[in-house]
Amino acid sequence: MFAVLLTLGMTVPLAGRRRWPAATFAVIATCFAVHEVVAYPATAGTLGLLAALYSVGALQERHRWTVAIVSTAGYLGFCLALVLRRSPEGIADYVVFYAALMMCAGIGALVRARRAEEVARRRLEAEGVKAAERAHIARELHDVVTHHVTAIVVQAGATKYLTGPPERVQESLDTIGMTGRRALKELRSLLSVLEATGERAEASEVPGLADVGELVALTKSGGQPVQLVVEGVAMVLPENVELAGYRVVQEALTNAMKYAAGCPTGVRIGYTVTAVEIEVANAGRTMTPERELSGARGLSGLRERVEGLGGELVTGPDADGGFRVWARIPTKSGA
């Protein structure tokens, strides 16, 4: 009867090994030691000792070295008790059995280390995704806010100097209101990314190349002479390509209003089978190095966006003394 109780003591405690691995091992090891010292016949309950050791290596979070030292001391006492009982096993048998026990604990420790590495890797990946999403949101906010606020400021400043019929002032104010509403629409679309549902904005709310005409019209109504030319047959492109193309035009027109106000500006969109080319150039004035630095954030953000889609972006003064922004984006980007 006592042998049955000891066998149960080497197996039943395994139910709590995930929560109390060290305590489970202590109970099972004690039952195993008593079972062997009393010289009961070997049973399958001995496997419980190996499972408990594996659990200690894999699940024990604190005081692992303390558990290892106490367990080794207990094993030495167990070996001494067997010698005093005149057990037929020799020192080599004790060493081999100890090595087998340590192997079980070592396998558990290896599994624990691999599990910790996997957790750390997933955490780094999650942090990378969060950082990329924050950068995406910051870039979108810069593009939306900078363009529309610049347009409103320029138009509001020009309104002060309007003379003539009141209709001209009313038209200018209507343009400011329209620009503000457009900014609010894009901000609502962007901020929907941050909602608790985690759902992105509907595709219809994301601006694309089809909206460039409206963008040009708003810019023109703000006093900037802009001409839009579309070459080739317009086609439906992936959403990220559409948005990138729109942002290229938006950022270029923003810089034109800020640094080349009143200068003729041309916008060209060319569709081919493999790519869409976008060019925005103003004539008669270019950005000084100081001004170029002030717009560097927007241009660098554009370059990252375009190159992330497998395209290329070129910016800088042209031969006529103006400033040119040129981008080529593959129409079937896999980014």
Image (spheres, rainbow, N blue to C red):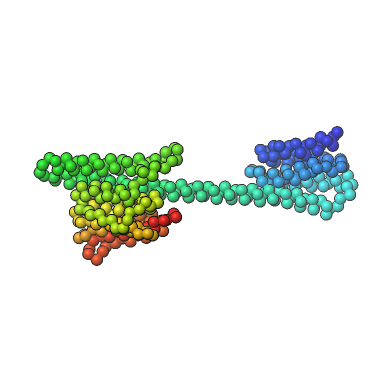
Q: Which of 283 and 120 is in front in this view?
A: 283
Residue 178 versus residue 266 in the image, above or below: above
Question: The N terminus lies in which quarter of the figure?
Answer: top right
- The furthest residue to the bottom: 319
Q: Which of 10 and 139 is in front in this view?
A: 139
Question: The C terminus lies in which quarter of the figure?
Answer: bottom left
Where is residue 25? Give x, y as percent.
73, 41
Which residue sits at x=23%, y=54%?
227
Where is residue 113? Give x, y as percent.
63, 50
Residue 324 versus residue 109 in the image, above or below: below
- The furthest residue to the front: 233
Which residue sits at x=24%, y=57%?
266
- The furthest residue to the top: 1
- In the rendered image, which quarter is residue 292 located in? bottom left
Q: How many labels does the image show?
A: 0
Residue 255, visible in the rendered structure: no
